[in-house]
Structures are given as C-alpha cells and as structure tokens.
Image (cartoon, rainbow, N blue to C red):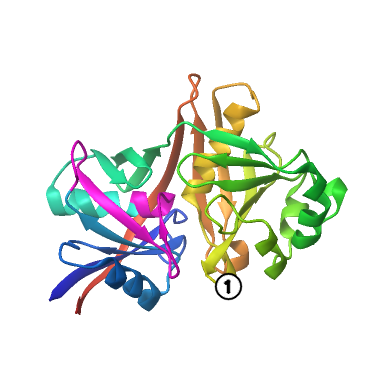
Amino acid sequence: MRYQYRLQNVFTLPGQTLTGNPLCVFEDAEGMSDAQMQALALQFNLSETCFILPPSGGATAQVRIFTPGAELPFAGHPTLGTAHTVRDLKGTGDQMTLETRAGNIPVSARDNRWTLRANPQTTRPFDAERIETLLVALGLARDDLAADPVWVDTGMEQLLVPLNSRYAVKRIVAGAALAEFPNINGKVSVYAFSSLDEPEMLVRFFFHRTASNIGEDPATGSAVANLGGYVVHTGRKLPLARTLHQGEFTGRPAELQLAVAADGRVLVTGEVIELGRGHVDL
C-alpha cells in the first residue's frame, strides 16, 4: 500500500524556510495499524509525525500524533501543520476543526499563518519539597526561579517552570535527572520560560523523545497553550499577548505567538511552510 506524506516546518521565522519545528503529515492513513504509525514516526525521527483520518463526527478531519516513542493526545505544531495540509487536500478554506485524542480543536488561518484555540486548562501543584531537586536537574539555583512550578494541562500535561530572566533560561543544562519528574502519563514534559512581564520571551521545552532519551524541542505549541493556561490560572491582567522565541539551543530557531483574550480564551499562532512531499510503500 502506498501512503503519501508532506514535510513541513512549523513556527518558522518570517521568510526563513529552514527554521521552526519539522513535521511529517501523512495525507490519508486509512488502513494503517497503530504499530505502523508508531514505526513510521520512529522512521522519520522528528519531534512528531501526524496521520490524517476521517473524523468520528463533528470535525473536519481526525489527526493522530506520534513522537518516535509514543502517541500524544495533543500537540501544537502538529495541529497547525495538519490543518495546513487538510486545507490543501479538502479545500476547506481558512476555518476548520481537528479531532484529536484531547478533543476537537478549532483552527484558523490567514494565508500560511495558523492559529489554534486551546482547551481550558486544568492545573495541579508541584510538590514544593522537590523544587530544589528539580532545579539541580535543570542546572539552576533557587534565585533563578520567579515563582513555584505548576503542572498545567490544556491537552497534554506539562510542568511549567517560571524563571526570572532570559539568562536563567539560557543556562539550563537538562539531562537524565529530569526523568524523576514525569507527568501524569509517565513522560518528561518540562517547559521553562523567562519573565512574563516582557513582551518577548525566551522559552525551552524538554521531553521524552523516546523511552530512554530526553531531548529538547525546537518549537512547542502545546506548551504555549499551557503557558496561556498558566496566565489565566495565575490571574494576570488580560488581554495579554507575547512573542516566544524557542529553538536556539537545537539549531532550529522558531517564533511562536501567544494571545490570551479578555475572556480567557488561549490562542497559539505560527507560520507553516511546506518543504516537500513523498510517499512510502508498506
């Protein structure tokens, strides 16, 4: 069976094709088994690989999202990149809804600039007695921390770590010790960010790339959604808009936009560029 795919870069810098987070999107995954999807995600070895399927009801299309090691209920750059593909395949125009394992996600576009509306957040506190251990795992000191870390979930739970400066974010040296801080699904998912008081922020995201390997992501839309949830949770003045810079330490600089509306709606925006197309025979 032949399956067509597209390669894209998501959250690119303006006019710079080879920036942002790479993504592979399979145009029609009907007939694929879960094991084949997982094996293809490992084959391409990108942060995520997506598979478009017919929706179960109420959405424009269904998307399943796999890292090289596991399936995700939701992820940001795969949602935007898949929407870009669905618009071209189905002629849907600039408004659609994608069905994910975390629910239906509304997505819209202006040209190749895509925006998703995140689910409302849930939160849970981080164990205060483990803060020092977490900071050691990140290579940081207590005075680098701007506030207590907190678990936030708008589709994929992540540990949000607010730091007081860009310098602190740059100094992070993360490694195997982060495995001591799994999310509710047993995976490392840690997002560190500089001060929310500044209109442009530096952010970094660390995750379980495979079962035994913790990596750094070039651009993480789900974390931007969770940052929006954190803004709402902590009672910041709304509306709020921030430009987020990520990927410097992976060699893939990226630009992501966060907007939190006055009513608490969280919007994540980034540019999508298609790089190429191909097929695999299974």
> Which of the two residues, 140 or 177, is positioned nearer the viewer here?
177
Q: Quadrant of the N terminus?
A: bottom left
Tell me the magenta residue range.
55-80
> Which of the two residues, 123 or 268, is positioned nearer the viewer here?
123
Give the quadrant of residue 243: top right
Q: Amino acid at mark 1?
A: Asn
- Residue at (16% x, 62% y) in the render: 30
SS at mark 1 in the image: strand
Asked if one can make out residue 121 in the rendered structure from this viewpoint, the answer is: yes
Q: Is residue 31 left or right of residue 113?
A: left
Q: Is residue 16 above or below residue 54?
A: below
Is residue 83 inside the magenta stretch?
A: no
Q: Is residue 123 left or right of residue 92?
A: right
- Residue at (35% x, 44% y) in the render: 114
Q: Is residue 48 above or below residue 167?
A: below
Q: Is residue 37 above or below residue 119?
A: below
- Residue at (50% x, 40% y) in the render: 225
In the image, residue 106 lies at what x, y percent? 31, 36
Q: Which residue is mark 1?
A: 213
- Packing grade of label 1 (10 A; few <14, some 14-19, many >=20) is few
- Residue at (20% x, 55% y) in the render: 53
Give the quadrant of residue 169: bottom right
In the image, residue 144 lies at what x, y percent? 82, 48
Give the quadrant of residue 51: bottom left
Asked if one can make out residue 171 in the rendered structure from this viewpoint, the answer is: no
